[in-house]
Amino acid sequence: MAFILKETGKLYYYLNDDIADPTTQHWPLMRTPWPGLMILTIYLLTVLRWLPEYMRHRPAYDLRRIIVFYNFIQIFYCLYVVYNSLKLGWLKHYKIVCQPIGDGPDSIEYAWKVCYTYFIIKLTDLLDTIFFVLRKKQNQVTFLHVYHHCGMVAVSWGMVKWVPGGHLTLVICINSLVHVIMYAYYLLTVLDESYKKSIWWKKHVTQIQIVQFTIILFHYVALAVAQDCPVPKQPAYILIPQNVFLVILFGDFYYKTYIKNKKIASKTN
């Protein structure tokens, strides 16, 4: 038992201190994983237990004004991340495959304006679930929804902690662009409820999400199989199964929602 605890301690200090990027360690929430884990724990307890219990005998809140403001803010900051990701990296000197971390004069600015801002956006994304519960839409608090939100917080924190730049951060640019489209759609549904009844919109938003995870998956695979690449491959080995799982989950959601239900409806008619 003592040996296990000793080796666990060594692994923790190795991950938290030895291989962490020194640029970002003094930034808020970055020194250790415990504050982030505490936030996710409170989030899970809030949306799965505390808030549903609180709302059980209460009417749904009207949050339209708050959600409109929230969506505008999310769109703005996602565009901010996409712009800086392209300006400081992917349209400047970044290579699509094997782009080293911290390469170039803009590396610290990229880490702050792209990677860290993206992490903060993933934290604010957690409000989506809270809005669902307060509006008494607990059916939308699915395993896919909660898992995806928690997973993206963990992935974005890990990028800032260990790889705040380079090959692995293409996901930030792609995912932020996808979220601009998503939050624009959510904004339209709040401003005009007729959009909620449009399967066409919902269907293509889901398709875009599946496409993004597929592109990101192949991007990580390219790193895993690349020869003489200066970028650490260990994160790719972790993120490849993560993205495979997300493609499966979103694909299953798409099939059940837009293909299976359509078949059932056509048979009924």
Image (cartoon, rainbow, N blue to C red):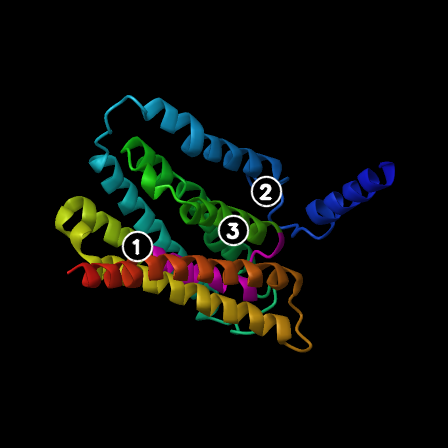
Kindly identify the residue that appears in the image at 67 percent across and 50 percent down. Answer: 20
Q: Given the image, on which type of amino acid does mark 2 rest? A: Met
Q: Given the image, on which type of amino acid does mark 1 rest? A: Met
Q: Which residue is mark 2?
A: 30
Q: Quadrant of the N terminus?
A: top right
Q: Tell me the quarter of the picture where residue 176 sits.
A: bottom left
Determine which of the numbered discs, if any, sits on residue 194 in the image.
Answer: none
Q: Which residue is mark 3?
A: 156
Kindly identify the residue that appears in the image at 63 percent across and 76 percent down. Answer: 226
Kindly identify the residue that appears in the image at 33 percent across and 43 percent down. Answer: 140
Secondary element at image label 3? helix
Q: Tell me the quarter of the picture where residue 66 sits.
A: top left
Mark 1 vs mark 2, foreground winner is 1
Compare residues 191 and 247 and report the one nearer the observer.
247
Secondary element at image label 2? loop
In the rendered structure, the answer to whether residue 33 lies left or right of residue 117 reads right
Residue 79 shows up from this direction: no
User: Where in the figure is residue 190, as x and y percent of width and height?
Assistant: 19, 44
User: Where in the figure is residue 112, as x and y percent of width and height?
Assistant: 50, 51
Q: Residue furthest right?
A: 3
Mark 1 vs mark 3, foreground winner is 1
Q: Is residue 153 magenta?
A: no
Mark 2 vs mark 3, foreground winner is 3
Main secondary structure of the magenta stretch: helix
Q: Residues within 10 Å of mark 2 (few under 14, many from 20)?
A: some
Q: Given the image, on which type of amino acid does mark 3 rest? A: Ser
Rounded to the nearest whole Å, what is the CA distance between mark 2 and mark 3? 11 Å
Compare residues 145 and 168 and report the one nearer the observer.
145
Compare residues 196 and 182 and report the one nearer the observer.
196
Q: Which residue is mark 1?
A: 182
Q: Which residues are magenta?
A: 162-179
